[in-house]
Image (cartoon, coloured by chain):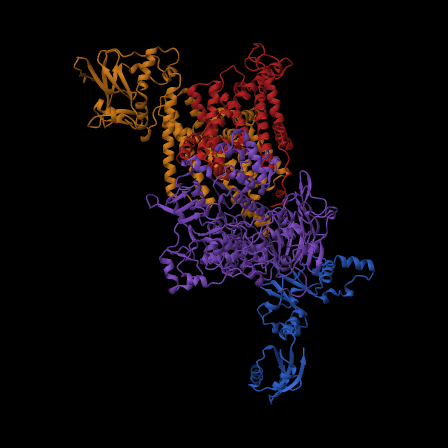
Chain colours: A blue, B purple, C orange, D red
Amino acid sequence: MLVKDYMTKHPPMAEPKMSVVEVQRQMSENNVRYLPVVGDGKRLLGLITPQSMLIDPRRMASLNVWDITRLLSDLKVKDIMIKIRSVITIDPDTPIEQAAQVMVENRVGCLPVVQEGIVVGVITETDLLDHLSKMMSGNMSGVRVTIRMPMIKGELAKLVGVIAQAGWGIDAMGGALCVKDAKKWDAVVKIRASKEEVVAALSAISSQEIIDVREV
Amino acid sequence: MRGPREVPILQIEQLAVAYATRHGDVAAVRDVSFEIHRAQTFGIVGESGCGKSTVAFGMVNFLGRNGRITGGRILFQGQDLVKRSELELRKLRGDRIAMVYQDPMQALNPAMTLGDQMAEVLIVHRSMKRSAAMERCKQMLERVYMPDPASVMRRYPHQISGGQQQRIVIAMALLNDPALLIMDEPTTALDVTVEAAVLDLINDLQNEFDTAIMYISHNLGVIARVSDEIGVMYAGEMVERADVKDIFARPSHPYTLGLLRCIPRLDTTKRSTTLQPIRGRVPSPTALPPGCIFEPRCPFARPACSHQPIPMREIQPGHWARCLYAEEILEHKDDLSDDMVNIIIGVAPKTDNGGPILRVKEAKTYYPVASKQIIGGQKQYVKAVDNVSMEAMPGRTLGIVGESGCGKSTLVKTIIGLEKLSGGEIEFMGMDISTPVSKRSEALIKDLQMVFQNPDSTLNPSFSVGYQIARPLRRFKTVPRNQVRDEVIRLLNMMRLGENYYGRLPRQLSGGEKQRVAIARAIAAQPKLVLCDEPVSALDVSVQAAVLNLLLEIQQQLGTTMVFIAHDLSVVRFFCDHLAVMYLGQIAEIGPAEAIYLPPYHPYTEALLSAVPIPDPSAEQKHIRLGGSVPSALNPPTGCRFHTRCPRRAMLPDGGAICEREDPPAQFDTDQHRIYCHIPLEELRKMEAVVTIEKEGPHVG
Amino acid sequence: MFRFILRRLGFMLLTMFLVSVVIFLVSEVAPGDVARHILGQFATDDQVKLLRQQMGLEQPLYVRYFDWLVGNEWRLRNKVDMPLVYTKARPKDEIQWWAEESDGTLVQWKYKTSSGSLEQIRIAPDDSREVVDFEGWKTRDDGSQYFWGVDTAGHVVLWVKNVEGAGSGPAAAGRSLGTSGGQEYYPLKKGLLRGDPGISLRTNRPVGPTLARRLRNSFSLALIAFLLIMPIALALGILAGLREGSALDRSISLFSLITTSVPEFASGVFLILVLSFWLDLLPGASVFVDDTAPLQQPKLIILPVLTLTLAEVGYVARMTRASMVEVMNAPYIRTAILKGLPYRRIVFRHALRNALMAPITVIMLHVNWLVGGIVVVEAVFGYPGLGLYMLDSALFKDVNAIEAGAMVMVALAVGTQLIADIIYTFLNPRIRFT
Amino acid sequence: MSALSGGTKTAEKRPSRLRRLWGGFSIILESRVGTIGLCIIVFWVLVAIFAPLLAPRDPLSQDSDAINKGSSEQYLLGTDQLGRDILSRLIFGTRTILVLAPLSVLASVTVGTILGLTAGYFGGLVDEVVMRLLDAIMAFPTILLYLIIIAAIGPSAVNVVIAITFVGTPGIARLVRSLTLDIRTRDYIRAAQTRGEHPLYIMFVEILPNVRGPLIIDALLRVGYAIFAIGTLGFLGLGLPPPTPDWGGMVAEARKFIWTAPLNVLWPILAITSLVVGLNLFADGLREETTRYQ
């Protein structure tokens, strides 16, 4: 579950001397929202994001329509890109959740994956979301059960024991601290079996409470 | 394996390339479009001269002095390459787009060590220091399973084997982690077991580096094994494009169908099917037919086909074809095309009348090699052929198969008398022919003729076709003087070459035609035995089928016995009654063709069969790969010569120590089927078949 | 590698031997008689005969060849039954043949035509010189008196008392016939293999020293030309090869075509016409006042060097260009281009080394031509080199000189071929000599 | 593997011998270089053929009162030291050159081809002996070889041809040998061997025609060198005995009077150079065309 397994390798890239108009056309044509800017040998120089495309009107000399078009047409990527020193990059070997953490803290949508200054890929929100849905096997049908249990050692073992006894496999499993009650812990499990059997088996565990059951 | 629908690494739209020649511009490639996504392999297949290499070189705009891109767009990661300046292209090459070609030996600088040549890519593109670059190269060499990378990097290209050279070239291409890797027939020059290993390597490198690969080959089997999507090219145009399974299951362009029909397959024999060649010749780029380019050779052609050029159209999601009647083609793809109906060959083996026509007993051919010491030093010998015994039955075909360096060509040359026999004896029609050809009697020479491999050098370029066929007639006086010309014309017609070929010079003929003239020359004197030294391996697939059928016809009509040498197991399977598998100068296994392709196998035969690429992605095939490389025949391994690479030695007690000590005994599966192996026959019988033999399958009969 | 060099050296000796035999045979077959050549048309036949005898030309061919190769004083010793020595009697004397008595005194005999008797020149170890009448005649059974001795002209002579020799004839080229009177003459030689290439028939002085001086002149001329030609030719060839098909390439090709189409003598004379006659910049002929001339007046050398360079640059340039063009179209250059290497790096690291392999070996072979080609240039400019020396000797049929010169030239030629092969192995890693 | 090589010509009836010859020529005419060379050669050949008509005066007649005169309307290019008209001597000189040079090249080509074929085809001891012999001759500086041969057999037209043949043979033999070594490995030679053909048949019928191409080009260059050699020998006084008009000799004699009649030396030099340039251009054109034609 490392960044290098989930990042987009060989992403489309831009060069500093390219014209912004050209880059904008490509981004719209290929519905790409982030373009790392690289020099020779894929060395990272900057990043183009949707925000960097919004050009601050104050920079315009005048609002006369001809001046604007002329200025826009010879605007170069290096004028609008986020310079390398303010671009947050990530190493391919970091765990994926750390990448998510960095993105959330810095409120950025894309992290160029860099090794010794060379761009080896790009990881964006969509990649993480894609990873999340795979973690929860979002694309597979089955019974999805949410169980709340106290924060005591052995509780999870009990849950897994019951499922194992019933002979079912666990397609996906996720868990997090309960938002409302710090002492409680919620687990989400996906099992390929009928809804009734699952509810019957799991409600037998006294200390745990089924919050939500649904056929997915 | 393919990510969600995002930017394809490479997008080609209506690419057109032309060469400026003295007679004006010649359009070598017209209207080629396809896409390649990340970690996906796009296979381009087509016969020689169809422009597939031009497409490859067009990507990196390396079209020589007179070639240039005349139309279409090449989008690499979203940006069009056609308008890029030479400097920008240079920065892309070797960093984001890498290339690997057919002959690795030529692609490496003979006067520079391998290490320098590899590190250069990093030094130039990554401006790495030499030591760091060398270290990176060593890691990459380990990644491509190169034994002892440090010493290999200090060596020169001519000091390593073909397979290793290709690994170095592939490693060099992947050093900068390119987004696109273009491979132009990378494994064509390699032996089938080495090729299989390299193809595996390409697959798992792709998984790790997510590189998009454009794989170009004329061999449908290789393409089926390696690519996800396939484009079939013919005479400069892409005629069909679809997912790999689609194209084999539902070929919907007559040319693709023709290609599939004329390839001999491992799981079919000459009894159960016929090879249907494509008639006619590939049109030259300067004289293209008006309508559909395949119309002149298409069995399903209709008047509408020749009116105007046919556009590519999507007959099914993801399946494109350049044919007006593609849907109809699908229905009757199984019935025979008309001109093939009358020749159902499936010849039943004749009853064995009398003993073998050719008997080889413990034949040995050694080449003396100057010893290294200054004076004296015992003479060293290359044991090219070492203790080989076999027979050829009259009217039947004995196949000899094996990889390069196994001594099959030397054996044939010894039989025909071009090489001196160092030991054992050879009998032909009861008479001893251990002497070189210059000392043999006229009668013996007349009855033993040979067909050679390379069509370009088999005919003397300075003499007309008629003269060269007439020469054996005059030499052996098989026909009175005045009838020589008529006899030559009869032979030409037999070879399906018209009378007007009589006066032509070899340079005006295509490869297939040259080979037919060579066959006519060989059978002119009505020999009893014809030795064929890989007669079809240098030909295109469609032409190959025609020549193979021709040889079968000759055998059927004239009853000539044939010894057929080849390295392609599916061709040999189709063509031969008996088969001998050779390894490093010795016979590993010999017997009727059916027995060879079914267990019990000699471990080497098993490895060979599992390496042969089958032109059908759905066929299941055992996966056995041989490690190491072929040892030198100068000092071959002791005992069984295959023990250094044999994957089956574990089946023997104490790890097959016996294999190193003693020569393998001949174990008789049936009276005609012998296997030279220490592994007891019962164990060998327990192995399951390498290839599941489909009885019905898409082929007729 | 060592074994290969040994074989090549063996081959060189064989070739030299072969060549020497051929030259001897050829000069034997040649019409015209050397002695007649020396004495001119007016000498009488018996004078010519005497000179031939004195030069040992009467002896059978194989004897003469053997003498020339190995020398004959050890054979003729038993005639004079005293050791024969080839030394300088006194430090400033010329090297001459002497008989040496047991106590070290050097002895020569002289025939006095007036009295028909012999006198002896004796030089004692303490360098005192005296001339004494010699009475040691030996008598044969038929009563005639004879004596075998060494004369002042380096012959072993048989004198017979009171029998008139063939008389004297006009002295020619430092050779006085007056000392004749001997019945049989055997010219003394140490033989090539023992360092003495013999006496030049033309100048009657040892061949060795003159040959050495001439070789030095020729060598310096060839060296300067070589050092001038190679860099220019290689550079031109590479430039033309890189820009194949461009205007530069065509002009270089045309220039080299024209210069190779002009024979050396034509270009030599042409240069004299233009540079020294019309523009009067350089001396027309390079006349050497003394040995060290080339260093003081470099102007003497300029024209010959220029001629040689003109003739040679074109040829090497064309060959380098062809090799460069071939290499630039080689598949491994295509790999280099597709590896994205900059043009300069492709040319210098990849192309050059392979491209220079072929020309380097041929250039070394050209040293051999250079030595030969100089003959013409030396003839045109009168430059006193080996070539001119060989030319004059050949015209004069001076066998000893031609032989010595030929030996040097063959040694040089085969030597350079050997060096060429050795260089080739270093340049081309694929070739390892067994 | 450009698409070009794949296409094969539509197979038409083989052209007649004459048309094939013209086809050969048309190739050469397409290369500019080749045509210029051909024109120069043809010019000189015509001069040689029509020499008697063109030459204003008998080349040997001496006009005692017009010695070393400059060009005048009587003597277009002036006279030499014996009062002979330089122009007519030049014109007749072409005859000597254009007879002797090709003759000697023809001789060395025949001898060289036979040696090269035998050495190349048989290999082994034969090859070693022939090669060592050729190396010995090659080891000799060419000029010296001329000197010795001419000195041995005396200067005369025949001897000049013999000398040049003797010097030219090793080069041709080497070329033919290397070509034979390559062709010997071809399959059509093996096919002939399997038919038990006699080695002589294989050498002269199967191999020789395929050696012709490069041999012709090399022969052209050798004619150039032969012209050099004739000129040089003439210059060194070893060439043709006077008074036969010979360009080399003319240069040698004119050199002595360079002070009084400088231009005399210029004309023979220009003549020789132009002829050799013509030959080289023609050879280059031919080589370019044949390589592109394959």
Give the x, y percent position of residue B395: 48, 45
Q: Residue furthest right?
A: A64
Picture quarter containing residue C97? top left
Viewer-nearest residue: C220 or B155: B155
Which residue lies at the image location 61% right of the left edge and 25% below the top edge? D40
B590 to A102, vertically: above or below = above
- Locate the N terminus of chain B by quadrant: bottom right
Q: Is residue C238 or residue D34 the one in the foreground?
A: D34
Point out residue B588 in the picture as x, y percentages from the top left corner: 43, 54
The mark total stands at 0
In this view, the residue farthest toward the bottom is A206
Q: Residue A70, percent across and down? A: 78, 57
Q: Quadrant of residue A145?
A: bottom right
* Side of C143 relative to D282 (left or right): left
Is residue C221 in view? no
Residue drawn at point x = 83 percent, y = 60 percent: A64
The answer to whether residue B295 of the structure is visible from this angle is: yes
Residue C101, position as x, y percentages in the image? 21, 26
Q: Is residue B178 above or below residue D251?
A: below
Q: Is residue B532 above or below residue C259?
A: below
Which quadrant: the C terminus of chain B?
A: bottom right
Most foreground residue, D294 or B257: B257
Horizontally, residue A74 falls left or right of residue B177, namely right
Q: Which of B224 and D34 lies nearest the eye of the viewer?
A: B224
